[in-house]
Amino acid sequence: MNAKEFIAALDHIVKEKGISKDIVFEAMEQALTTAYKKNFDSKTNVRVDINRETGEIKVFSYLVVVDDYIDGEEIVDEEGNITYTEPEINPDAQILLEDAKEIVPDIKVGETIEKEITPADFGRVATSTAKQVVMQKIREAERNSIIEEFSDKQDELMVGTLALEDANNYYVDLGRTRGILPKKEMIPGETVKMGSSIKVYVTKVEAGTKGPLILLSRKHYGFVKRLFESEIPELAEGLIMLYAVAREAGVRSKVAIYSTVDNIEPIGACIGQGGSRIGNILKELNGEKVDLVLYSEKPEEFIANALSPAKNAIVNITDEKKKEALAILDDDNFSLAIGKKGTNVKLASKLTKYKISVKTLAQINEEGNQD
């Protein structure tokens, strides 16, 4: 490969892989240094320089200038006179200052004396030897570039394409890489088709041993949160705030919201005209029910709201320190407050951060009579 071909190939790699040109040059120089030492049995310090414009490759050996006494042992006689033993230097890597000055009079300790030693057939040897190392560096740079691109995508909603599946996972094409969507992170009961578009919540982005690891979910409560933010403009504008989300994927979610301005009713804004906004969210949730809960700074009101679809709950905080509350409901709303398999009251507890006990007025009266 001649210099022009090398630069053309490099430009192609940079464009195709989306990585820094300097990273590829540095990888090449490191690989060619290794190639030279291996093929020419070099014991000296060696560096390889690639001209960034022309692609011309040159190999240099160099010696580091050291002080005359850098390795010499200091000897002090009885009269305090100091002498030194002969310095021991590595002739393949170092040169004494006094000898270096005969070549370059104004040279200083720590500087180097270089000599070009580029072999005539080095291009052929270097290309075959360095290819594997260079490709490894390019893969590393590409992985780092992808990690950097996706690092701010964690806890965000993304749209991808279902590309592959195996026994345990779906693999979602996200552009430059694929994310892993475990089947256990799907909404229970939903079915998907390969090649179709899919919305996913990014739960983790990290560098794995074989490349970037991007884990996805549709079951995470954050998926519901981001769906609301994408569908309700007032949330993005800060006119409505999303306080919390509690979710039993495939069954029910509770979303607590409140308005920051007086002229916006938050629940109505989230429902949208004719139910259009909430309808778009429900389509994505495979029949999962969603309760819109009005947040209140008063815990009694917030808990009563969180027990929706039950109504007219009378709430007492029984232990503020332990975050415990009692909700009293009539017979018609009692079962709604509990929910199927206790799901409704469990989600209300998650949403409000209170342990909620639910009883009917008859149960309270019965307990009172027993006392």
Image (cartoon, grey):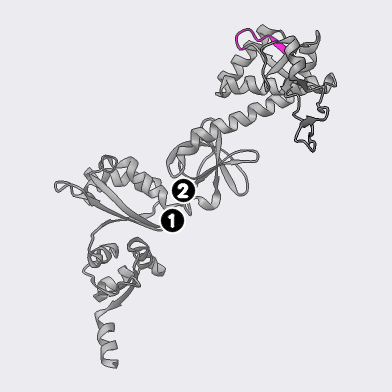
Between discs 2 and 1, the one toward the N terminus: 2
Q: Is 77 located above or below residue 299 in the figure?
A: above
| Residue 330: image tag | none
In the picture of the structure, the residue carrying the numbered disc 1 is 249
For the N terminus, the image quarter is top right
> Which structural element holds mark 2?
loop
For the C terminus, the image quarter is bottom left
- In the image, residue 57 lies at what x, y percent? 70, 11
- In the image, residue 72 lies at what x, y percent? 79, 30
Outermost residue, bottom direction? 370
The answer to whether residue 111 shows anywhere in this view is: yes
Dot 1: within a 10 Å radius of its alpha carbon, few (fewer than 14), some, or many (20 or more) residues?
many
- In the image, residue 48 lies at what x, y percent? 71, 17
- In the image, residue 140 lies at what x, y percent? 63, 31
Q: Amino acid at mark 2?
A: Arg
* Magenta span: 52-61
Magenta span includes 242:
no
Residue at 67% across, 23% down: 110
Dot 2: within a 10 Å radius of its alpha carbon, few (fewer than 14), some, or many (20 or more) residues?
many
In the picture of the structure, the residue carrying the numbered disc 2 is 218
Q: Judge from the rendering whether residue 41 lies leftward or rightward of residue 11; answer left or right.
A: right
